[in-house]
Image (spheres, helix red, strand yellow):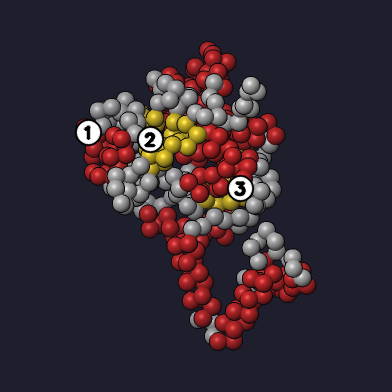
Amino acid sequence: MKSQKRNTLIDLFESSVSKFPQNTFLLEKHNKQWIETSYESTRKSVYELGAGLVELGVNPKDNIALLSEGRNSWIIGELAMFYAGAINVPLSVKLDEKNDLLFRLQHSDSKYIMVSSSQLHKIRAIKDELTHVKMIIVLDPLDKYEDREIHIEEVSRKGRLLLERDLAGFLKIGQSLTNDDIATITYTSGTTADPKGIMLTHRNYTANVEQSLTLTDVQENWRTLIILPLDHCFAHVVGFYIFMHRGAAIATVENGRTAMETLKNIPINLKEIQPDMLLSVPALAKSFRKAIEAGIKAKGPRVEKLFNLALRVSYLYHQEGWNKGSSGTIALKPLVALFDKIIF
């Protein structure tokens, strides 16, 4: 019987680093400036953190919860888990600590937690009930760490020491993963019963990447701004992994001091990044549309009529996106370009 070709998320990442080592992979805003991180530099950080997890005691098939806003550390953290042979349990920052969060952490038997400083208070509030958790990895520096807490940089420092001693041994852990090994456990909302943990394998993800790219093309010089939470399956596969597969760049929204401040950063970041493709969900798209239409209406009836005409022409030309300009609508292209310039 012919053996199945290995196609894990580690294979996907290593292939992209090999093809696009100097391409920008991650974009994150610090002190009013966007910092670019290449594929090669990202892999270095992933190796260090992954090796650090091994030094911390993480074993293959251990579950590690990840509770954080979208950021470089989220992406690096998940990839590092895979190199340690572990499984990511991505959690929404909207979860309440006493009910939803506690249930998922206990039900998944997560042995470790990666958490941002803004979400740490939720973990500390239930820490006494998380007796199965061995260590809490904090993504931001703190003045003081409590029992079972460690800064992510300290974990990476441990990893660098392991890599100096046994790089080949560390890499064997990730290389031992198969297509059928679980990559993530994503929980349902739990609106009708207790949340269910959806187990997705490495091949589930890589197959979804291949399928997604039959419907949309992504160029290596493209950028996206991920405005959806990274624990969201759609953002996870389409926002993160198809861009990684193509050697393109991923920016995350600048985190504010509050959730509302982060939301307000979205339109600012959109103008700064100018993404080639943006992922949304109906509720978010509806909110954007209402704001745009209100702004147009405020400019008077003549502008509103022109806007509505431009929309009708654009809908006719673009169709479902993948088939734009077909069925005789190619003649509308100059008009669409004009409307893009003066209206959209």
Asked if residue 136 shows in the view, the reply is no
Q: As drawn, which residue projects farthest toward the bottom?
A: 301
**Circle 2: is it few (<14), some (14-19), or many (20+) Cα within 10 Å?**
many
Q: Residue at x 70, y 34 (%)?
A: 19
Quick one: SS at disc 3?
A: helix
Above/below status of 273 relative to 85: below
Q: Nearer the viewer, residue 241 or 52?
A: 241
Q: Nearer the viewer, residue 192 or 147?
A: 192
Q: Quadrant of the C terminus?
A: bottom right
Q: Residue at x 64, y 63 (%)?
A: 320
Q: As drawn, which residue projects farthest toward the front?
A: 1
Residue 264 position, x and y percent, is 44, 60
Label 1 and label 3: CA atoms lie apart by 41 Å
Q: Reading the chain from its start, which is encountered first: label 1 or label 3?
A: 1
What residue is pinned by disc 3? 212
**Circle 3: is it few (<14), some (14-19), or many (20+) Cα within 10 Å?**
some
Q: Nearer the viewer, mark 1 or mark 3?
A: 3
Q: Quadrant of the N terminus?
A: top right
> Which mark is on residue 65?
2
Left or right: residue 84 versus residue 7 is left
Residue 30 position, x and y percent, is 50, 46
Q: Reading the chain from its start, which is encountered first: label 2 or label 3?
A: 2
Which amino acid lies under the numbered mark 3 shown in the image of this protein?
Ser
Quick one: SS at disc 1?
A: helix
